[in-house]
Amino acid sequence: MDIRINLENGERTVAAILIVDDDPIFCTPFTAYLKKLGHQCQTAQTFSQGAALARDVDFDVVFLDVLLPDANGLECINYFINASSSPELIIITGKSELSGAEMALENGAWDYLEKPPAYDDVKLTLKRALQFRDNKMVSPTREGFKSDFIIGRSPVLKKCLDLVAKSARTDGNLFISGETGTGKDLIANAVHLNSERSGAPFIAVDCTNLPDTLVENLLFGHAKGAFTGAVDKNEGLIKQADKGTLFLDEIGDLSTAAQKSILRVLQTKTFRPLGMNKELSCDFRLISATNRDLQAMVKQRTFRKDLFYRLVTHHIHLPPLRERPDDIVLLADYYMEKICAQFGIRPKAMSDDFIDTLMVYDWKGNIRELISVLHAAVASGLNEPRLNPHHLPVALRIFSRKKTWEEQRPLEQGIENGLGTDETGFPCLKDFRHLNESQYLDALVRLSGGHIEKACSMAGVSRSGLYHLLEKHNKKLNP
Ligand SMILES: Nc1ncnc2c1ncn2[C@@H]1O[C@H](COP(=O)(O)OP(=O)(O)OP(=O)(O)O)[C@@H](O)[C@H]1O
C-alpha cells in the first residue's frame, strides 16, 4: 500500500485507514465513503487479520469494532495504538457497549462513534483525529520528557522511549515486559516522573514470594485490632499510592488468590482494609512488570486472562541488550564514570579490545550484568589507568572469544568448501559476501522472531530493503 500524505493548506487529504469490522452491511458502504473522501482503506474482519495488517502497514487511523468474532475490540486497543505507526484509534460501537467505549478513551482511543454513525460525524471525527496526528508528528513525541538517566541511542530503545513518553501522558494501566535487568524498574520510574502524578508517591511492590497470608494486609492495610498483634491501624500500599503510581514488579509471580484481590481493586477502584467494615476508594495509576511470558501463563491458565487484559492497556517491551549492541558502549562509558566515582578514583579508559569483548558477549543479565562486570573490571584493574580484556571475568572472555571464532568460521568454511575460489583456494569476495549475508539473515529471522518491524530496526534497513534481501536468498520471515 502506497501511503502518501498530502497536505493542502496544512490539512491532510489522504490518510491510510484500517477498518476492523466483521459486518459487511456496515463495512462495505463505510469503506466506500472513506475512499470517496480520498483516503486509502484496508479492511479486516477479525482481530487477527487486523493485527497482521497493522504489523505490516503504517496506518494513520484504525476504526475498530467492539464485537469481533475472535476478540473484544476494547481489549485489543493497546495492540493497535502500540503499532509502529501509533495510529489514532476510533471505536465503532453499538449502544450496549457505550460505557466500555467511554472507558476506551481513558486508555488511549481517540474517540468513539455509535453504530451506524452519521457520515458527517465520521468526517468531522476523522478530520480532528488527523489534525491531532499531524500536530503530534510536527512536535516531537518526547519534547520535555525527562530521560537523561536512561542511556542508549539504538533505534529499538528510541522506539521504546517514544512509547514511554506517550504512556506517561495518559493514565491507562501500563505493562512492561522484558528480560531481567533490561530496565523495567527504571522505565516504570520514568513514566511516573513524567506523568501528572509525579507530585504524589511512587509505590513499588515486589510480588515475588508474597505469601497469600500477607498480600491483603500489605496491599490493603488493617484496622487497629484486626488480628492478634494489630496494635495500631496500618495503611496499606494501595492507600499510600493514592493520587500516585502503584508499581507491581514481578507480577507474574502473584499467587492465584492475590491475582483475584488485585483484579477486584482494578475493577472497582475500592478496597477494604482487614478488620474494617467499609470500603475505601483509591486513585492510582497501575504499572506492572515481569520478565515472565504472561501471555503463555494465560494460555497455561496460571495467570488470569481478565487480569491480564486489565494490565495491558499500554504495553512496552524492553529489548535485551544483545539486540542493541550500540548501547553497550554508551552504557559502559556512563557506568564506568559512576563506578570509578564510587571507588573515589578517576574514570578509567577502556581499550578497544575491552569494548570489543563487551560487544560480542550475550548479556543474559542485561544492563544489571553489565554494571556488575564493570564493577569487577574496575576492582581488578584498580591501579591501572586503562582496562584491558584480561580485567574482565574469565567466563565472559571465553564466551566472547568463542563467539568471535564462530563468526570467523564462515571464512574458513568458505575456503574449505572452495567457494568460487581462485587458484590460491581463497573464496572470491562476492561469494563470501553472499554466504555471510545468508547466515546474517538466518540469525536476523531467528532473533527478531519473524517480526518485520523488529527485523528492520535490528538490521537498520528499510522494509522494502529487507524483503528484497530475503527474496534474493529465497528466505522467509516466518519459515
Ligand atoms: N537504559 C538504561 N540506562 C541506564 N541504566 C539502565 C538502563 N536500563 C537499565 N539500567 C540499570 O540497570 C539496572 C537494572 O535495571 P532494572 O532493575 O530497571 O531492570 P529490571 O528489568 O527491572 O530487572 P528485573 O526483571 O530483574 O527486576 C539498574 O541499575 C538500572 O538503573
Image (cartoon, rainbow, N blue to C red):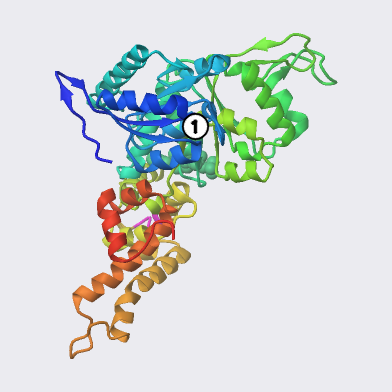
> What's the residue at 60%, 33% (across, down)?
308
Q: Residue at x 18, y 91 (%)?
A: 423
Q: Which residue is mark 1?
A: 22
Please name whichever residue, 13 or 355, is drawn nearer the observer in this view of the structure.
13
Q: Tell me if mark 1 has few (under 14), some (14-19) or many (20+) residues whose alpha carbon lies within 10 angstroms of its own.
A: some
Instruction: Tell me the quarter of the picture where residue 293 sits.
Output: top right
In x, y percent, where is residue 187?
44, 34
Residue 186 placement, left or right of 156 = right
Up/down of 464 relative to 216, above or below: below
Residue 441: % across, % down: 34, 62
Is 395 contained in the magenta span?
A: no
**Can residue 381 be found in the magenta stretch?**
yes
Q: Position of residue 464 (x, y in %)?
A: 26, 51
Q: Which residues are magenta?
A: 377-383
Q: Quadrant of residue 109?
A: top left
Q: Give the vertical position of 384 relative to 315 (above or below).
A: below
Residue 265, by quadrant, is top right
Residue shown at 25%/74% (left/top)? 432
Quarter holding the N terminus is top left
Does mark 1's beta carbon lie closer than 8 Å to ligand 1?
no
Q: Amino acid at mark 1?
A: Asp
Label 1 element class: loop
Side (left or right) of 89 relative to 279: left
Q: Nearer the viewer, residue 18 or 448?
A: 18
Tell which residue pokes out farthest to the bottom in this image.
423
Residue at the extreme right of the image, as rendered: 228
Quadrant the C terminus occupies? bottom left
Note whether residue 149 is visible: no
